[in-house]
Image (cartoon, helix red, strand yellow):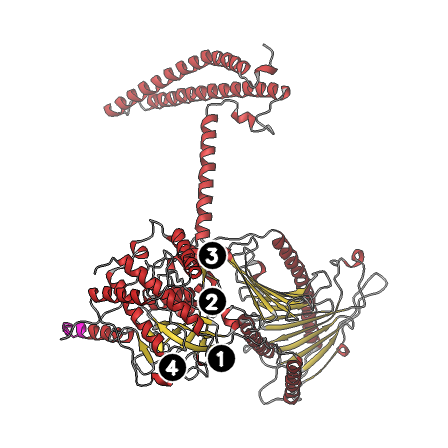
C-alpha cells in the first residue's frame, strides 16, 4: 500500500492529537512523580525505529488503523487551530520546506511517533514529550529541525550574553495557555522575529539557534519552573541595575575618599573610623530586619507549570560550568537554581534526549552527560553529537597541518539515520533590529520596588534610552529616586539622577562639553542660594578638577598646576552682604571672610621658603603662612603678617610697615631673621597674591552662574547628534543631504532666472521683492538709469585713459630715439619703427572705440529707459 507524504503527515498529526488528549487526562493522577521513571522502567530500553521508507508507510497505516476516533468537539477545535495557522501563514512566498515535509522528515516523524508510543507505554504517569509540534503553515515538524544554527556578523551577538540580551529585549512574552500543557504550535525563528511575540519554547528556539551558530553547546530544555519565571513576573526580584549601581557607588566613594586624602592629607582616627563603620553596619542590619520580605503566594500549580529555557554545557567558548539561560529575561543561572523545578527533555539540532533521572528534588542533582544512555534516552541512536563533530574538526585540522588526508571509516553496517537539515531559512537580523531592539522601541519591566524603562536610541527627542525609578513601597506608588541614561545629546549629558526625597539632582557628562564639566550635583531648584558640586576633566588650563559651592563657603581642588596649588577653601561672611551700589558685587555675592590655600612641595625651593599653606583673613587684615617640613623635622616654620591700614581719604593717612606687624616661628634658632625690607617685600607679594586670589574667586563664582545658565538653556533647547554608522543616523544624513541638494537646486534655478534680470541688484534692498510700491518703483527707475550712466562714463574714462597712456608711451619713445639716433644700430632702428607702428595702431583703435562708445551710449540709455518703463513691475507706477 502506498500513501503520499501529505497523507502520512496527516496521520501523524491525528495520532499526536490523540496522544496529547490522553496525556492531559492522565496528568491529574500522579503529579508528584512528574519527572522520573517508575521502577518498572529499570532494565527496559526504548526500541529505536530503523526502517526503510516502505516500512515507515506501513507503520503509519498500521498505527492509523489502531488509533481511536476522538470526540467531535476536540476534532473541530483542533481543526480550527490548524486552519487558522494555515490561512494566516501558508503564503506562496514562504519556502517549500515550511509547507511540506521531505522524505527524511516523514521518516523522522515516524521514528518520533514510535518513540512517543513506547514512552507512553513505559511511562504512563509522565506527561507526553514535545516532539512534533505544528508550524505556522499547519505542518508537523520535529522540534530539532526547528533549530537553525545561525552566525551573525554583529559583534554584540558573538557571545551568549549579547544573544540572550537581544532575544529578551526583541521579543514579547506570550504565556502558555493552559500553563500545564505543552504547546501544540511551534513557529519558526523567522516568523517569531517578524511578529516579535513568542512563547517560552519559541524564545528558547531563537536563542538556541543563535548560540549554536556562535559555537556554543546549547540545548533547549523542556521542564517545569516556578510561576514567577513562567509568567515573567519579576516584581519580587531586585533590579540588576540596582546591584550594579551599588557597586559603582561603593567604588566611587572609595575613589573620592582616596582623592580627598590625596588632596587634604588630614590625619584621621582609625578608632573613630571603625566606630562609625560599625554604627553604619548596625543601622543597615536594623533597617534590613525592619523591611518586610515579601513572600509569593502559594501556587496550586507549583511543579506543573511547563517552561522552556536553554542549557549551555561547559567545554565550548570558555564556558567553565554548565549554566541555564532564561530567554524571556536574558539572565543566566546555575543548574541548581531553585526556580527550575524539573527537566523532561533537552534537544539541539542534532538529537533529542529524554531525562531518565529523578527530579523530585529539582534540578540540583541532575547530571548533564548526554552520552550516558542510563541518564538520557536519545530519540536517534548512534548519531554524531556536537562534541564528536568538534573532535572530528580538530582532527581534520591537525591532519591537514601534517599534510595527511582525512579518510572516513566506512561502516560495515548501514549508516544510522541522521537528523535532517532544518526546514527553517537562515535567521536574518538587521542592524535596525539591533538598534530598535524592543517591540515598538520601548519596554517596561517591573522589579521589586523598581521600574525599568528601556527606549530605542533616538526614539525620544531628549535622547533618553533608560529610566530606572525606585519606590518606597512594593506597590510602586511613592517615588524615591529616578535615574536616567541618555545617548547622543549635544550637551554630552550621560546620566541624570533625581532624588525625590532630598531634592538633589546629579548629572554626569561625557568629555568634550563646555567648561569641561563631567559631574554636577545641585538642589532641585537651582537658585543663587543653591549648593553645587562640580567635577571637571583634566583638560582645563587652570587645573581645576573639583568645586563645591555653597552660600557659606566654596572649596576647589586642583591638579597639575605650575604653582603647586592643590586645595583652596573660601569662607564667606554670611552675616554681611553690602548693597550692590556700594560694593560693585554680583547679585548674591558675599564678602570674603577667610581663604585657605594649600600647596604641594616644590623641589626647586628650600623647605623653609616653600609655602605649604597660606591663610588670608580679610576681616582681621591677617595673613598666615606655613612652610613645608624639612627633613628630620616635626614642626614647620610659620609667619603671621598684619597688613598696614590703607588711606581712605586725606585725613586718614596710610599706616607705615613696622617689624611688629610680623610674628613667626623658625625651626632653626641659628638662622638669622629676615631684615625689615625683606619682610616688607614678602608682605607686598602676599598682598598682591591676596588680590589675585580674590579675583580668581570672583571668576569662579561667575563661572558657576554661567554653568547653571548654560544648563538651563541646553535643557530648553535639546539637540541630538546622529551617528552616520547607525540606521537612524544614516537616514537622517540622507534626508539632510537630499534637503541640501534641493535647496542648492532651487538657488541655482533662481540664479539662472535672475541672471539676466537688470533689476536684480536693486531689488535686494527691498523687504519683499514680490511687492513693489510706487516710491520703490520710482527709486528703482532712477537708480537703474543713474547706475547705467555711471557705468558708461566709467567705461569712456577707461578707454580715454588707455588712449592717453599709448600716446605718452609713443612720445617718450620718440624722444629717446631723437636723443640717441646717432648711436643706434640698424637692429635698434628696426625695433623702434615696429614699436612706433604698434602704438600708432593702438592709438587709432582707442580713438575709434571711444567714438563708437560715445555714439552707442546715448542709444543704450534710451533703450534702457524704454525697457524700464515697459517692465511689468515698474510700469504701473511710471508715467510715460
Q: Nearer the viewer, residue 869 or 784?
A: 869
Q: Are marks 1 and 2 in contact (CB under 8 Å)?
A: no
The image quadrant that residue 250 belongs to is bottom right
Q: Is residue 507 visible?
A: no
Q: On the rendered structure, is 778 left or right of 379?
A: right
* Distance from Cα at disc 4 to Cα at disc 2: 30 Å
> Label 1: which residue?
338
* Distance from Cα at disc 3 to Cα at disc 4: 46 Å
Q: Which mark is residue 360?
A: none
Q: Secondary structure at mark 1?
A: loop
User: How far across and down, in percent of the image, does residue 198 sit?
Assistant: 45, 62
Q: What residue appears at the point 46 percent right and 79 percent down from the top-left corner? A: 30
Q: What residue appears at the point 29 percent right and 21 percent down from the top-left corner? A: 834
Q: Is residue 293 above or below residue 202?
A: below
User: How far across and down, in percent of the image, does residue 284 sit?
Assistant: 64, 81
Q: Secondary structure at mark 4?
A: loop
Q: Nearer the viewer, residue 434 or 329?
A: 329
Which label's residue is closer to the chain start, 1 or 2?
Answer: 2
> Label 4: which residue?
37
* Distance from Cα at disc 1 to Cα at disc 2: 17 Å
**Crowd tier of the residue under label 1, counting other residues whose Cα lies within 10 Å: few below 14, some 14–19, many 20 or above:** some
* Distance from Cα at disc 3 to Cα at disc 1: 34 Å
Q: Secondary structure at mark 3?
A: helix
The image quadrant that residue 696 belongs to is bottom right
Q: On the rendered structure, is 732 left or right of 351?
A: right
Q: Which residues are magenta?
A: 399-411
Q: Is residue 96 above or below residue 133?
A: above
**Crowd tier of the residue under label 4, counting other residues whose Cα lies within 10 Å: few below 14, some 14–19, many 20 or above:** some
> Label 2: which residue?
328
Q: Nearer the viewer, residue 404 or 746?
A: 404
Which label's residue is closer to the chain start, 3 or 4?
Answer: 4
Q: Is residue 88 above or below residue 39?
A: above
Amino acid at each position: 500500500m502506498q500513501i503520499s507524504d501529505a497523507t502520512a503527515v496527516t496521520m501523524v498529526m491525528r495520532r499526536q492529537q490523540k496522544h496529547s488528549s490522553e496525556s492531559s487526562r492522565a496528568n491529574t493522577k500522579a503529579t508528584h512523580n512528574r519527572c522520573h521513571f517508575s521502577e518498572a522502567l529499570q532494565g527496559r530500553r526504548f526500541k529505536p525505529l530503523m526502517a526503510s521508507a516502505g516500512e515507515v508507510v506501513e507503520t503509519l497505516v498500521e498505527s492509523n488503523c489502531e488509533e481511536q476516533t476522538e470526540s467531535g468537539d476536540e476534532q473541530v477545535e483542533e481543526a480550527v487551530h490548524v486552519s487558522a495557522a494555515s490561512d494566516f501563514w501558508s503564503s506562496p512566498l514562504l519556502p517549500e520546506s515550511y509547507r511540506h515535509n521531505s522524505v527524511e522528515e516523514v521518516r523522522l516523524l515516524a521514528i518520533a511517533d514510535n518513540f512517543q508510543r513506547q514512552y507512553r507505554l513505559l511511562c504512563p504517569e509522565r506527561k507526553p514529550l514535545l516532539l512534533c509540534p505544528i508550524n505556522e503553515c499547519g505542518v508537523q515538524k520535529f522540534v530539532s529541525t526547528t533549530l537553525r544554527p545561525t552566525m551573525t556578523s554583529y559583534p554584540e551577538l558573538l557571545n551568549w550574553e549579547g544573544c540572550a540580551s537581544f532575544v529578551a529585549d526583541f521579543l514579547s512574552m506570550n504565556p502558555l495557555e493552559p500553563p500545564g500543557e505543552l504547546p501544540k504550535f511551534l513557529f519558526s525563528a523567522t516568523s517569531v522575529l517578524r511578529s516579535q511575540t513568542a512563547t517560552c519554547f519559541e524564545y528558547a528556539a531563537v536563542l538556541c539557534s543563535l548560540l549554536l551558530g556562535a559555537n556554543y553547546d546549547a540545548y533547549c530544555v523542556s521542564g517545569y519552573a516556578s510561576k514567577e519565571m513562567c509568567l515573567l513576573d519579576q516584581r519580587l526580584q531586585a533590579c540588576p541595575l540596582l546591584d550594579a549601581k551599588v557597586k559603582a557607588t561603593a567604588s566611587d566613594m572609595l575613589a573620592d575618599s582616596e582623592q580627598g586624602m590625596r588632596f587634604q592629607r588630614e590625619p584621621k582616627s582609625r578608632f573613630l573610623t571603625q566606630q562609625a563603620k560599625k554604627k553604619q553596619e548596625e543601622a543597615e542590619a536594623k533597617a534590613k530586619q525592619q523591611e518586610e520580605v515579601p513572600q509569593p503566594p502559594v501556587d496550586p500549580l507549583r511543579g506543573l507549570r511547563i517552561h522552556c529555557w536553554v542549557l549551555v554545557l561547559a567545554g565550548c567558548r570558555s564556558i567553565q560550568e554548565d549554566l541555564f539561560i532564561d530567554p524571556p529575561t536574558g539572565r543566566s543561572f546555575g543548574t541548581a537554581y531553585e526556580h527550575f523545578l524539573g527537566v523532561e527533555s533537552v534537544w539541539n539540532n542534532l538529537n533529542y534526549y529524554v531525562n531518565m533521572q529523578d527530579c523530585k528534588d529539582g534540578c540540583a542533582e541532575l547530571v548533564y552527560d548526554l552520552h550516558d544512555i542510563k541518564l538520557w534516552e536519545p530519540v536517534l541512536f548512534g548519531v554524531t553529537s556536537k562534541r564528536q563533530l568538534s573532535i572530528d574538526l580538530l582532527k581534520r585540522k591537525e591532519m591537514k597541518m601534517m599534510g595527511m588526508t582525512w579518510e572516513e571509516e566506512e561502516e560495515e553496517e548501514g549508516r544510522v539515520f541522521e537528523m535532517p537539515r532544518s526546514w527553517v531559512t537562515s535567521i536574518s537580523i538587521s542592524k535596525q533590529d539591533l538598534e530598535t531592539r524592543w517591540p515598538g522601541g520601548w519596554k517596561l519591566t517591573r522589579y521589586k520596588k523598581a521600574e525599568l524603562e528601556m527606549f530605542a536610541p533616538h526614539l525620544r527627542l531628549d535622547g533618553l534610552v533608560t529610566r530606572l525609578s525606585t519606590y518606597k513601597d512594593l506597590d510602586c506608588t511613592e517615588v524615591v529616586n529616578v535615574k536616567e541614561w541618555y545617548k547622543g545629546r549635544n550637551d554630552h549629558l550621560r546620566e541624570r539622577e533625581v532624588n525625590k526625597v532630598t531634592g538633589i539632582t546629579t548629572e554626569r557628562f561625557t568629555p568634550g562639553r563646555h567648561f569641561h564639566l563631567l559631574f554636577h550635583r545641585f538642589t532641585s531648584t537651582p537658585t543663587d542660594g543653591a549648593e553645587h558640586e562640580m567635577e571637571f576633566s583634566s583638560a582645563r588650563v587652570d587645573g581645576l578638577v573639583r568645586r563645591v559651592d555653597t552660600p557659606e563657603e566654596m572649596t576647589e581642588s586642583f591638579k597639575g598646576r605650575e604653582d603647586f596649588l592643590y586645595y583652596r577653601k573660601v569662607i564667606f561672611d554670611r552675616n554681611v552682604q553690602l548693597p550692590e551700589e556700594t560694593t560693585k558685587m554680583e547679585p548674591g555675592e558675599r564678602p570674603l571672610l577667610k581663604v585657605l590655600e594649600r600647596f604641594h612641595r616644590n623641589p626647586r625651593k628650600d623647605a623653609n621658603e616653600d609655602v605649604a599653606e597660606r591663610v588670608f583673613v580679610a576681616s582681621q587684615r591677617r595673613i598666615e603662612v606655613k612652610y613645608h617640613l624639612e627633613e628630620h623635622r616635626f614642626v614647620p616654620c610659620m609667619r603671621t603678617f598684619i597688613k598696614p591700614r590703607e588711606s581712605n581719604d586725606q585725613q586718614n593717612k596710610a599706616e607705615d610697615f613696622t617689624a611688629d606687624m610680623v610674628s613667626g616661628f623658625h625651626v632653626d634658632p641659628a638662622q638669622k631673621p629676615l631684615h625689615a625690607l625683606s619682610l616688607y617685600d614678602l608682605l607686598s607679594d602676599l598682598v598682591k597674591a591676596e588680590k589675585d586670589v580674590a579675583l580668581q574667586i570672583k571668576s569662579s563664582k561667575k563661572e558657576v552662574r554661567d554653568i547653571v545658565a548654560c544648563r538651563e538653556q541646553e535643557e530648553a533647547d535639546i539637540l541630538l547628534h546622529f551617528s552616520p554608522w547607525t540606521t537612524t543616523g544614516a537616514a537622517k544624513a540622507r534626508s539632510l543631504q537630499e534637503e541640501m541638494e534641493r535647496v542648492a537646486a532651487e538657488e541655482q534655478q533662481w540664479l539662472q532666472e535672475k541672471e539676466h534680470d537688470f533689476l536684480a541688484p536693486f531689488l535686494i534692498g527691498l523687504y519683499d521683492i514680490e511687492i513693489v510700491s510706487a516710491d520703490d518703483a520710482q527709486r528703482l527707475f532712477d537708480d537703474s538709469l543713474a547706475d547705467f550712466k555711471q557705468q558708461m562714463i566709467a567705461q569712456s574714462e577707461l578707454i580715454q585713459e588707455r588712449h592717453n597712456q599709448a600716446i605718452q608711451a609713443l612720445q617718450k619713445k620718440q624722444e629717446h630715439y631723437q636723443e640717441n639716433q646717432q648711436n643706434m644700430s640698424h637692429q635698434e632702428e628696426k625695433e623702434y619703427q615696429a614699436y612706433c607702428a604698434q602704438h600708432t595702431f593702438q592709438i587709432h583703435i582707442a580713438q575709434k572705440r571711444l567714438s563708437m562708445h560715445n555714439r552707442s551710449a546715448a542709444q543704450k540709455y534710451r533703450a534702457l529707459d524704454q525697457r524700464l518703463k515697459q517692465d511689468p513691475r515698474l510700469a504701473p507706477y511710471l508715467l510715460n
